[in-house]
Image: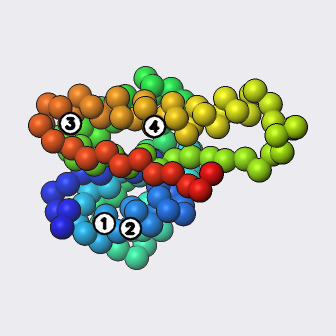
Amino acid sequence: MLKGKVAIVTGGTRGIGYAIVEKYLENHATVVLCGSRQETADKAVAKLKAEHPDWPVEGIAPDLGDYGAIKAAFDGVWERYGHIDILVNNAGMSSSTPLADFTPELFRKIMALNVDAAFYCILAVSEAMTAQGSGCILNTSSMV
């Protein structure tokens, strides 16, 4: 179903993101998963390759709070594969901190990952998708 497609999945090292990565690979996409640290991205790739050594998957860890880092990483994907067909914005976080203990810093940290990073990733792939005349952007959210 996804043969020949290149997908980038943020938050792809565990949970829902990892399941998305697996499903895309099962459907013959090439997947670049993003982790919060290179070591977690590498660990996820190693786990996938241990079961399916031929799966075309790689891991990257751009700072999702830094548009320049995201743009550079995603431009690298475009240069390596010649296209980016799918972006899954899955990285996110929440907090169970009671309102009385919530701080502006914690709120900013949550918004930076859940909102700003999603926008930065969309902006970073928009040039590639516009140039190739197609693309799909999926934004996930949890119950919080």
* Residue 22 - label: 2
Q: Give the mark nearer the N terminus: 3 vs 4.
A: 4
Q: Which residue is mark 4?
A: 118
Mark 3 Cα-neighbour bin, 10 Å: few <14, some 14–19, many ≥20 = many
Where is 63 relative to 8, above or below?
above
The residue type indicated by label 4 comes to: Ala
Q: Give the mark nearer the N terminus: 2 vs 3.
A: 2
Q: Which residue is mark 1?
A: 25
Image spot of residue 129 (x, y percent): 20, 36
Q: Give the mark nearer the N terminus: 1 vs 4.
A: 1
Q: Give the mark nearer the N terminus: 3 vs 1.
A: 1
Q: Nearer the viewer, mark 2 or mark 3?
A: 3
Secondary element at image label 2:
helix
Would you say 121 lies left or right of 105 here?
Answer: left
- The part of the image, by quadrant, that contains residue 132 is top left
Where is 28 relative to 11, above or below?
below
The residue type indicated by label 1 comes to: Leu
Would you say 27 lies left or right of 140 here?
Answer: left
Mark 4 Cα-neighbour bin, 10 Å: few <14, some 14–19, many ≥20 = many
Q: Nearer the viewer, mark 2 or mark 4?
A: 4
- The part of the image, by quadrant, that contains residue 31 is bottom left
Cα separation, mark 2 vs mark 1, equals: 5 Å
**What residue sits 66% from the left and 33% below the top?**
109
Q: Which residue is mark 3?
A: 129
Q: Give the mark nearer the N terminus: 2 vs 4.
A: 2
